[in-house]
Image (cartoon, helix red, strand yellow):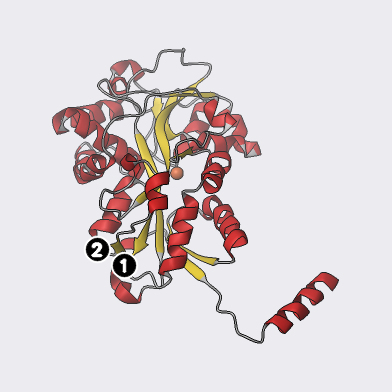
Amino acid sequence: MFARTSLATLMALAGAAPVLAEEVNVYSLRQPELVQPLFDLFTQKTGIAVNVAYVEKGMVERLVSEGGRSPADLVMTVDIARLAQVVAAGVTQPVVSEVLAANIPAEFRDPGNQWFGLTTRARIVYASKDRVADGEVTTYEDLADPKWRGRICTRPGTHDYNLGLMAAMIEHHGADYAKEWATGLRANLARKPEGNDRAQVKSIWAGECDISLGNTYYMGEMLADPEQAEWANAVRIVYPVFENGGTHMNVSGVAMTKAAPNHEAALKLMEFLSSDEAQKVYAETNHEFPVKPGVERSALVASWGDFTPDNLNLMDVARARPEALKLMEEVNFDG
Ligand code: FE
């Protein structure tokens, strides 16, 4: 109370000239608990406030309809296809920054500077410690083999994460093969696709299936939750590869809106998110892979072992997404 009074007094004294508070407005498709610690740190360091609107659906439509009057400066989302959609809608602007160019490797940012990757994640297999032997899971292609009949769980095939994987399958092997693969995978499912990635691990724990598809960081999230830790401890992470490539990767990223009323402050936030300090938070708190070279994975993430990231260009994966959705619907993957 005393400290607060003193501070208020000081502020009143200093307040002869009004101070314009700087701020940044962010539309985020990322969960609040994942990005808030980063924004808090940014505000602490710069005094710039970050206002976040969590936009679950219709982000692109909203930005299009708001046009030049949009209050949003930045858009933050997961998935390369979603980043590509925002850019394709014409609601972003290129950002030229030496800091961003130095911190983010070229393969994780748009050649036209419209979007910037901030973290990567792998789409991997969670395998039952009890019922799946070491070396039994090898490739994504193999998941369509009848030997897995009734043993696989996954979230819906039309979810962005699985569409990214399907799009990569199309890029590696062509649409005909990918359709056949999805048909085989569907035939191997223990049950109709439902729930999120963690719900599939719970199903393995409950004995309903032996392997599931999921993103890497969910292992970290489950281990941090008393109830879910039990599910996590029933499985181990396996990094499958494409027969002619590596493990499927995706990104989370950021783009600046065309409107960006707080352009300078927004640029500062973008650059901060690519800095060692923020990249470390992404690694330690969110269990994601930092994009900035030299920033280490967390000890937990490192304990899952090394892997070879797939070599596909992310923009090619984004480009194949509409076809991936069409094929998933054709094979009635979620039906
Ligand atoms: Fe996720």
Position of residue 312 measured from the top left corner of the image (x, y, whole percent): 26, 33
Dot 1 corresponds to which residue? 258
| 148 relative to 279, above or below | above
Find residue 69 and report its image quarter: bottom left
At horizontal 40% and vertical 45% (from top left) the residue drawn is 102
Q: Is residue 157 visible?
A: no
The x and y percentages for residue 315 are: 25, 43
Determine the residue located farthest toward the right in the rendered image: 2
- Comparing 94 with 309, the one in front is 94
Mark 1 vs mark 2, foreground winner is: 1
The label number, if any, that marks residue 59 in the structure image: none
Quick one: which residue is furthest to the front in this view? 98
Point out residue 316 in the picture as x, y percentages from the top left corner: 22, 40
Q: Position of residue 234 (x, y in %)?
A: 56, 24
For ligand 1, give the image quadrant.
Answer: top left
Q: Nearer the viewer, residue 94 or 223?
A: 94
> In the visual, does 251 lie left or right of 296?
left
Q: Is residue 266 above or below residue 200?
A: below
Residue 284 lies left or right of residue 154; in this view the side is right
Assign the N terminus to one quadrant of the image. bottom right
Left or right: 264 in relation to 277: left
Residue at image position (60%, 84%) is 18
Residue contact at pointers 1 and 2, CB within 8 angstroms: yes
- Which residue is identified by label 2? 90
Label 2: how many residues lie within 10 Å, few (<14), some (14-19) or many (20+)?
some
Kindly tell me whether mark 2's CB lies below 8 Å from ligand 1: no
Secondary structure state at the residue bearing disc 2: loop
In the rendered image, which quarter contains the C terminus?
Answer: top left
Callout 1, which amino acid? Answer: Lys
- Looking at the image, residue 136 lies above or below residue 273: above
